């Protein structure tokens, strides 16, 4: 088994199974019990929402936030874990109903930036500098409700204020084209990196690419990752899968698109991702049908598929590939890939 990748997931990936059409179907797993599962399942790092680390963060003073985050760091240490990244969960607060950074109400925009600063305090107390901005509600249900020029400027302003607040923080923007909004303002990695380039410190803004989000945008996730790797901006990934253009499914990695998954690993290997020390993050959901005692299989299964495909990439006959390319015989190349993946020859 290739040992040079490190894996992480977020506590929200062990969930109660509720969906928009039905209530929860599994009991809540206490945060401490989730932490205890990480190492057992073969994961080394935790992805945090700010209020995973400090519940009810809005009602707490800066001193209390820091104390609680430091307590969480001790818990992590006790489990032999680290914090990979942290994210401000703006989308659950009633004030963020129509977005935070791009809200029409200036008081809400101010709140979103203040909340992001609290997140940074939490992240730093957890010993982490990598902040993820998944811009959940920064978009529109109908185009007429906001102005895309102003919204882009508001997003830029937020990024700049975050960069000003901490000289240590680095931001990975996680693009997604839709859901919960009809249209998001930062739908692709191209938009995310362009926003970073417009910021006051482009060196500190990069991206996190989620497979399902690229697929929902009609793009190839491995090419998206290649684009970010070429710019040295792939700072984390959310591996999962998606069966076509529908709601965001967060299926186990490789379970719908094995060929996509193989190409993702090819590009991560070619781009030196394992050597960068960055994590392979998962963002996967258990099926709602899964019983509570086996509602973590999607995590280990995703990791198993990932590692099996690393093996496949590393045992791929690159001489054969070069020869096919030289002959411009892509039919031969394709059947070679399929045989290798199927183990049929
Ligand atoms: C939802 C996103 C979400 C984020 C997470 C980190 O579609 O993928 O899960 O990755 O909240 O900010
Ligand atoms: Mg994600």
Image (cartoon, grey):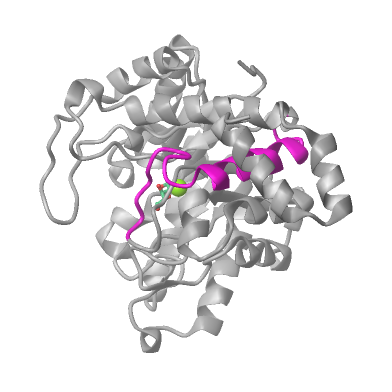
In reply to whether residue 318 is colored magenta, the answer given is: no
Identify which residue, 75 or 292, lies in the foreground.
292
Residue at 56%, 25% in the rendered image: 308
Residue 306 appearing in the image: yes
Q: In this view, does 245 lie to the left or right of 124?
A: left
Residue at x 63% of width, y 34% of height: 340
Question: Residue at image x 83%, y 57%?
Answer: 328
Quadrant, the C terminus: top right
Left or right placement of residue 27 versus residue 227 in this view: left
Counting from the top left corner in percent of width and height, residue 129 is at: 61, 37
Does any portion of residue 62 appear in the rendered image? no
Q: What stretch is highlighted in magenta?
A: 247-274
Residue 295 vs residue 230: left or right?
left
Rendered image quadrant of residue 265? top right
Compare residues 271 and 66 and report the one nearer the observer. 271
Q: Where is residue 53 in the image (x, y as percent from the top left)?
A: 38, 32
Magenta span has 254? yes
- x and y percentages locating residue 294 in the rendered image: 24, 23
Q: Residue furthest right?
A: 326
């Amino acid at each position: 088994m290739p040992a040079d990748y490190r894996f992480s997931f977020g506590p929200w990936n062990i969930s109660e199974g509720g969906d928009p059409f039905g209530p929860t179907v599994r009991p809540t797993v206490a945060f401490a019990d989730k932490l205890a599962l990480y190492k057992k399942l073969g994961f080394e790092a935790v992805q945090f929402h700010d209020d995973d680390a400090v519940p009810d963060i809005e009602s707490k003073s800066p001193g209390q936030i820091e104390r609680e985050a430091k307590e969480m760091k001790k818990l992590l240490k006790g489990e032999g874990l680290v914090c990979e990244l942290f994210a401000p969960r703006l989308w659950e607060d009633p004030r963020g109903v129509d977005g935070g950074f791009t809200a029409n109400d200036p008081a809400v925009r101010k709140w979103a930036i203040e909340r992001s600063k609290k997140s940074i305090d939490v992240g730093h107390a957890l010993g982490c500098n990598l902040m993820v901005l998944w811009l959940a509600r920064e978009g529109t249900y109908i185009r007429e409700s906001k102005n895309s020029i102003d919204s882009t400027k508001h997003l830029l302003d937020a990024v700049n204020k975050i960069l000003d607040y901490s000289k240590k923080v680095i931001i990975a923007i996680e693009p997604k084209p839709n859901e919960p909004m009809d249209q998001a303002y930062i739908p692709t990695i191209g938009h995310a990196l362009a926003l970073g380039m417009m910021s006051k410190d482009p060196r500190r803004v990069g991206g996190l690419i989620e497979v399902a989000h690229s697929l929902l945008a009609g793009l190839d996730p491995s090419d998206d990752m290649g684009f970010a790797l070429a710019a040295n901006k792939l700072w984390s990934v959310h591996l999962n899968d998606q069966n076509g253009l529908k709601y965001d499914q967060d299926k186990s990695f490789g379970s719908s698109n094995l060929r996509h998954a193989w190409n993702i690993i090819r590009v991560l290997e070619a781009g030196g991702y394992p050597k960068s020390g960055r994590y392979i993050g998962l963002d996967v959901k258990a099926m709602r049908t899964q019983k509570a005692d086996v509602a973590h299989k999607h995590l280990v299964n995703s990791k198993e598929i990932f590692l099996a495909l690393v093996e496949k990439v590393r045992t791929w006959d690159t001489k054969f590939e070069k020869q096919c390319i030289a002959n411009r015989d892509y039919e031969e190349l394709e059947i070679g890939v399929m045989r290798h993946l199927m183990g049929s020859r």
